[in-house]
Image (cartoon, helix red, strand yellow):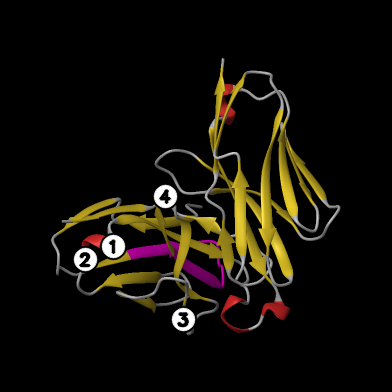
Amino acid sequence: EDQVTQSPEALRLQEGESSSLNCSYTVSGLRGLFWYRQDPGKGPEFLFTLYSAGEEKEKERLKATLTKKESFLHITAPKPEDSATYLCAVQAGANAGGTSYGKLTFGQGTILTVHP
Amino acid sequence: NAGVTQTPKFQVLKTGQSMTLQCAQDMNHNSMYWYRQDPGMGLRLIYYSASEGTTDKGEVPNGYNVSRLNKREFSLRLESAAPSQTSVYFCASSELYLGNEQFFGPGTRLTVL
């Protein structure tokens, strides 16, 4: 069974204090790993897709990296507007077979609060 | 370009009542999805439609039915609502079923009394 575990559950930072969020996963044949941002009362907003170990992607103050077992979302010099819940999800590939093929499995998210 | 839209935004039902949640996307995506999000449980897939004309069960399909009305629209029906179906429901779409990011709607907050 595919599993995604995100840590920490909650993270409080001061503005400008860089840190990382972790997403550990087990999946049958990773097809893609997705990072989303979710603001309170809204739907998840897509950030990044990573397809293979060693891949990195950046957007403003965010940088996502991928290994064979986990992904990190690095936040450099965060601002209060970066406060949100960050969700990680994995998609099983063709060798997953059966009912897992193509399905997204989400982690429970990390609630990030950045204080001014 | 509105992306993914959902109606209604909020709904309160009594146990046993039925209702349909509507979802539409204007991105010409082939695949559409329905999720529910509960505290401590994360997002869980209810049903999905990999392409127009097909629908399949996700992780938690019991108590729900879906209809892919056309390429743009994908509805979720609760035939006889139960308190356990109190949740926030999200519709999403993606260009293709595999490998593509999913784009989410704003959600419907449903309470079943």
Give x and y (percent) for residue A34.
66, 55
Give x and y (percent) for residue A13.
61, 23
Which numbered dot is residue B110? none
Check chain identity for marks 4 and 1: say if they share one: yes
The crowd level at tag 2 (other Cα within 10 Å; few <14, some 14-19, many 20+) is some
Image marks 3 and 1: residues in contact by CB distance under 8 Å: no
Give x and y (percent) for residue A72.
73, 44
Q: In the rendered structure, the residue with mark 4 lies on which chain? A: B
Q: In the rendered structure, the residue with mark 3 lies on which chain? A: B
Q: Going from the N terminus, do you reach mark 4 or mark 1 first?
A: 1
Q: Quadrant of residue B19?
A: bottom left
Give the vertical position of A99 relative to B104 (above or below).
below
Q: Amino acid at mark 3?
A: Thr
Give the vertical position of B30 relative to B43 (above or below).
below
Q: In the rendered structure, the residue with mark 2 lies on which chain? A: B
Which numbered dot is residue B55? 3
Q: Amino acid at mark 2?
A: Ala
The crowd level at tag 1 (other Cα within 10 Å; few <14, some 14-19, many 20+) is some
Say which element carries label 4: loop
